[in-house]
Image (cartoon, rainbow, N blue to C red):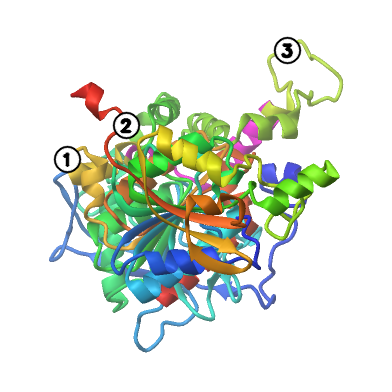
Amino acid sequence: MTQNQKCRWDHKAIYDIIPDGASVLDLGCGDGELLAKLGRNKKVQGLGIEKDFYQVAKTTSHGVSVLQVDLDTGLAGLPDKSFDFVILEKTLQVVNKPLLVLEEMLRVGKSGVISFPNFGHWRVMSCLMETGRMPVTPELPYQWYDTPNIHLFTAKDILDWIRDNDVRLEKGFSLMDGKVFPFHEDDAVNAEEILLVISRSRSKFGSEVI
Amino acid sequence: MSDPINAVVGSKSKFDLPESPHSVGWIVSHTVRLADEANPLPLECGKTLAPVDVEYEFYGKLNEARDNAILVLHALSGDAHAAGWSAQADELGRPWLKKRPGWWDDLIGPGKAFDTTKYFVICSNLLGSCYGTTGPASLDPETNRPYGLRFPVVTVGDWVQLQERLINHLGIERLRAVAGGSLGGQQALEWALAYPDRIESAIIIASAPGLSDQGLAFNAVARNAIMTDLNFRNGDYYGDPTPDYGLTIARMLGHITYLSETSMRRKFGRRYRNGEGPGFHFGIDFEVENYLLHQGEAFVERFDANSYLYITKAMDYYDAAVWGDGDLDRACRRIQIRSLLVSFSSDWLYTADQMKELAFSLCRNRKPVSYVNIQSSYGHDAFLLEVEKQAHLVRCFLDGGDLA
């Protein structure tokens, strides 16, 4: 959707994370290329969700299933834990209701994969501090008025959310100076982009219900 | 669509003429007997029917492997003439066929979405219709008079069963795709449920697993209009004055359901026919009245009232969930093929929500399904008017099937 063509490292990382034969739901699947590749090479059963008509059409031309549904309306038609993986590849920051989308991701998927540009990267922060203007970087190449990124957040923000919402961080990767490293919390200001694999350790309201 | 106003009327100025490289050209229809005394057609209502003749057309070439066929399915008032120009308008007594090409000419032809240089495209007229396939106006062999209401009540399932006989007749084992809009979409869905191993994909447009109560209500009123026409005489009007008033009103009602509030406002805008103001009479005052009357009267020229009763009844009865004893999710388990579901945002006859529900039903069963809701203000009519996006989508989806 908003993938900067120069930074497709997460594409490759996600491809490597998904095991053979998994079922995968890709939220904001763009032209469906990832699912097509996963289907072709890893026998993955994929479903895309995408808002843009032409991207949806392109996805079907890859033989990939896709629903033109607005993520902000939720995924009520899909049952709990019906996918092994749910992917949000640089999509979370463009939706209107990121928390709803995250909750739906954890409900529908056994694991979730999120990749996002880190607004807390030192270069972004110094850009803001030094110029007093919204940062424009290779990962965030937009002006304030034309950015599709309507909910920018930092690595620390998402880690807070993970801690406060009974979410388990299974693993993660950081993009630093164009190289990919395993994610550490200490990297929060050095990572340009981050990819996290998360899951919900137990039902959010499980204990109360029991 | 460059001129939305004209598009609403459906009066397209630019057709592909027969000599156009994108037209399938002059077309001759075919008729085949697919049921006779020895091999009658068993119907869902419990009766059997014989003889049954089917009128059909085809475009493009069936390849040697016989695996490039696509069956397109027409809606309520459609016919087998889906593309190109009929070479038999006079011979068949259907002069209106001279005015425009087949009903899906925008999508069928060389280089079009259903590319006839690649696919062999077939379309047949529905059982119970009045365009060459056996229907209520056909002669009942028992009485040697037209059936009228003695024609058995037929269903979407019966139609599809008959279409399967046609496919057998043509020596086709598996169809590359079945495709249709509105009632045609329901036939495509029925194909996927009834003959999952005879097709590779289904394209279901502006349709639903079942008509809403709102839709049932409109059809009920339409049939009432026909059946209370003094000329109706219990359907035995052949050779006598026909129930034109009733059929006109039925069609007027139909057209209300094909438009949207927005498309009506854009087209008519409360304008008066005389361009001035109220006429203080009960004749035609408003443009919208004039439009509906025109549509209704033109329809009477080309359609049989009994066929309208039979086809709307089949439309009412259709319920895909029957395959799952009332549970659509269970019904969808039967489907083994990839499907493309397309709705239009302003269609209130077959709504986007109904189509989305079907899409999620298929998803829950892990069936390969794609769902698209095309933004349009044309209402249900969008299925014949939103040509560009539809064509693009159909082409992409069919390309995707080549990969599988």
Q: Secondary structure at mark 2?
A: loop
Label 1: which secondary element: loop
Label 3 sits on a secondary structure element that is: loop
Residue lying farthest front? A186
Residue type pointed to by label 1:
Asp
Q: Nearer the viewer, residue A191 or A145?
A: A191
Label 2, residues with CA under 10 Å away: few <14, some 14-19, many ≥20: some
Tag 3: amino acid: His
Tell me where residue B271 sits by quadrant.
top right
Mark 2 or mark 3, which is nearer to you?
2
Disc 2 and disc 3 in contact, CB within 8 angstroms? no
The mark found on residue B325 in the picture is: 1
Q: Residues within 10 Å of mark 3 (few under 14, many from 20)?
A: few
- Label 3, on which residue? B281
Residue lying at 49% horizontally and 31% vertically, measured from the top left: B250
Residue B113, position as x, y percentages in the image: 56, 68
Which chain is indicated by disc 2? A
Residue A204 numbered mark, or none: 2
What are the residue bounds of the magenta stretch?
Answer: B289-313
Percent coordinates x, y for residue B200 in the rendering: 34, 68
User: Horizontally, is B229 left or right of A1 in the view?
Assistant: left
Query: Is residue B60 found left or right of B54 in the rendered image?
Result: right
Mark 1 against mark 3, which lies toward the viewer?
1
Q: Residue B403 in magenta?
A: no
Locate residue B160, reporting x and y percent: 29, 57
